[in-house]
Amino acid sequence: MNNICVIFDLDGTLVDSEGLGNQAFLDLLPQLNDSLETLTERYRGQKLSSIMIDLENRLGLTLQDSFEQQYRQRVAELFACDLQPMPGVLDMLATLNASKCIASSGPLAKIRQTLEVSGLAAYFADNLFSSYEIGSWKPDPGLFQYAAKAMGFVPDQCAVIEDSKVGVEAALAAGMTPLCYVQTGVTNSYQAAGHVVFDDMSQLPQLLEQFANTIQFNR
């Protein structure tokens, strides 16, 4: 599969971090009445600044200037204790024979910590791309476009592995093929939207092989 590039989202796709990230909001904002599941679905894939604005509007308050730092510190603590790769990810990456990278909305330091804690760092080396480095956040296509160019591929050679609606929209806007990971038991809004959806990481190599064969056939 040397004719394709696999661009992975990180949070909620390779690592089971969405719940931990939203638990940090509940820990820091006791006036939040949402369940963890409701928060996770509401904010899946969104950038932190947008989430903070929404929280301010919903709670009728102004978050302190120090809130982002406090939030990131709490997330780092939760990750250090509890972060795990998604089921089947380690086996999938060990057998995946294709160029691959990470394209995440999180800061580069968070990406690196996440990969180290979850045991995934060796699979990606320095092929890490952050919205904070590029200045483009999903659903804008800029991050994926930048990652593809840096990896040496054109958009139609790229499969994007995503778990969020904004990520899927960004992939489509970039001219790439989204493959939507939906964790078993999790409901999301694009399961019936006509995209390729899978719930088991062991299925991904076969889906990517099909994608690579399609690319080869069409060239």
Image (spheres, rainbow, N blue to C red):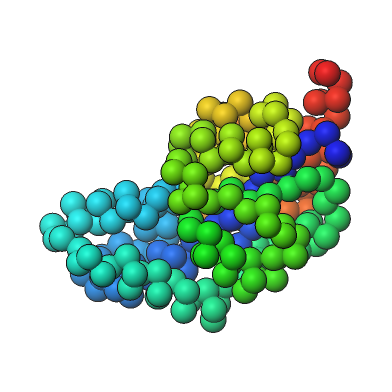
Q: Left or right? Give the position of 40 relative to 86.
A: left
Q: Residue at x 63, y 66 (%)?
A: 115
Residue 187 at least partly seen: no
The part of the image, by quadrant, that contains residue 159 is top right
State how many labels appear.
0
The part of the image, by quadrant, that contains residue 213 is top right
Residue 199 percent coordinates (x, y): 66, 50
Quadrant, the N terminus: top right
The part of the image, by quadrant, that contains residue 211 is top right
Q: Residue at x 15, y 60 (%)?
A: 62
Quadrant, the C terminus: top right
Residue 4 at least partly seen: yes
Residue extending furthest left? Answer: 60
Q: Residue at x 62, y 53 (%)?
A: 128
Residue 180 percent coordinates (x, y): 62, 42
Residue extending furthest bottom? Answer: 81
